[in-house]
Each structure stands twice: as structure tokens, then as C-alpha cells.
Amino acid sequence: MKVEGRCLCGAIEFEAEVQPGSMTICHCLDCQTHSGSAFRANISAPAASFRLTKGMPRTFVKTTASGNKRNLAFCENCGSPLYACTVENPQAYSLRTGVLQQREALESPQREIWTKRRRAWVALAGVSETHDGQP
């Protein structure tokens, strides 16, 4: 499925291909902090299908618990989080579903990760796969 992403102010736009029904909810503390919420909703897109169509995002390099380095891309004007990918030679982009124009068509999330960090008041219906940490 082709999706188009756009930051809140419209300075950054992109397109990619995703598989509906493959959305992941991440409850890690970094995602909570970076999203300003209790979790982040992501969907993976192969690097070959990802294309910036307008603007250039800023990036912040995050070092994960495993030592891997990830680019967190965002709009420098409005602050909208857009995607994450490895710093070198990305094979996939983790798109932030809130910026996708087709977010209603993505279907419900089927996977939750870092559930050991999930807020006690968060309960998602229909999730079939859960992981205490990074799978």
C-alpha cells in the first residue's frame, strides 16, 4: 500500500510502501519521551520504497540500549516526528503513523514491544503479539 506522510506545517513530505496490518506499538521509555505520549505507533517501509518529496528533515542520532545508532527524523519547523532509520545504509524506515495521510487504512496494530514499560492504564484491543523488550 502506498502512503504519503506530511509534518504538521507541511514543510516535509514523503511517500513509501507499507504492509497494512503490520503496525507496531512501542512502549519503550525513549518512544514515550520522543512522542510526548504513552507509546509510539510505527509501521515499517522498505528503504527502496521510501522517498522524500518535499523538504529535508532534521535528524537526531539516538544510541539504543544495544549500541546501535538510529536517525530520528523530525521537522525543524513544527517538531513533528516523521521516521527513524539506521544511520548508515538503512534497509527500512520506521514511519510514525500519525503523520501518514492513510493512517485510517493501516488496520489495528498487531504487535506491541517493550510492554514491560507500558503504562498500567494502556490497554489495546486485538493485539496478537507482545514482547517485553526488543524482539
Image (cartoon, helix red, strand yellow):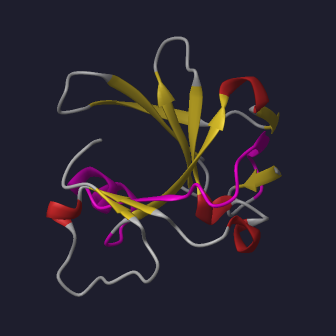
**90 sits left or right of 129 in the view:** right
Q: Which residue lies at the image location 55% right of the left edge and 58% below the top edge?
A: 23
Q: Quadrant of residue 35?
A: bottom left
The front one of 101 and 133 is 133
- For this orientation, the residue located farthest to the front is 128
How many numbered discs, if any?
A: 0
Q: Residue 7 in the image: state x and y as whole percent.
A: 68, 56
Magenta-span inclusion, residue 65 = no
Q: Residue 113 in the image: state x and y as whole percent.
A: 31, 55
- For this orientation, the residue located farthest to the top is 89
The front one of 78 and 115 is 115
**129 sits left or right of 28 in the view:** right
Q: Residue 131 in the image: state x and y as whole percent.
A: 26, 54
Q: Residue 49 in the image: state x and y as whole percent.
A: 78, 31
Q: Which residue lies at the image location 21% right of the left edge and 56% below the top edge?
A: 29
**Magenta span:** 10-38
Asked if 126 appears above or below 55 in the picture, the reply is below
Asked if 9 appears above or below 105 in the picture, the reply is above
Asked if 86 appears above or below 125 in the picture, the reply is above
Asked if 108 appears above or below 55 in the picture, the reply is below
Magenta-span inclusion, residue 23 = yes
**75 sits left or right of 119 in the view:** right
Q: Which residue lies at the image location 50% right of the left edge and 30% below the top edge?
A: 85
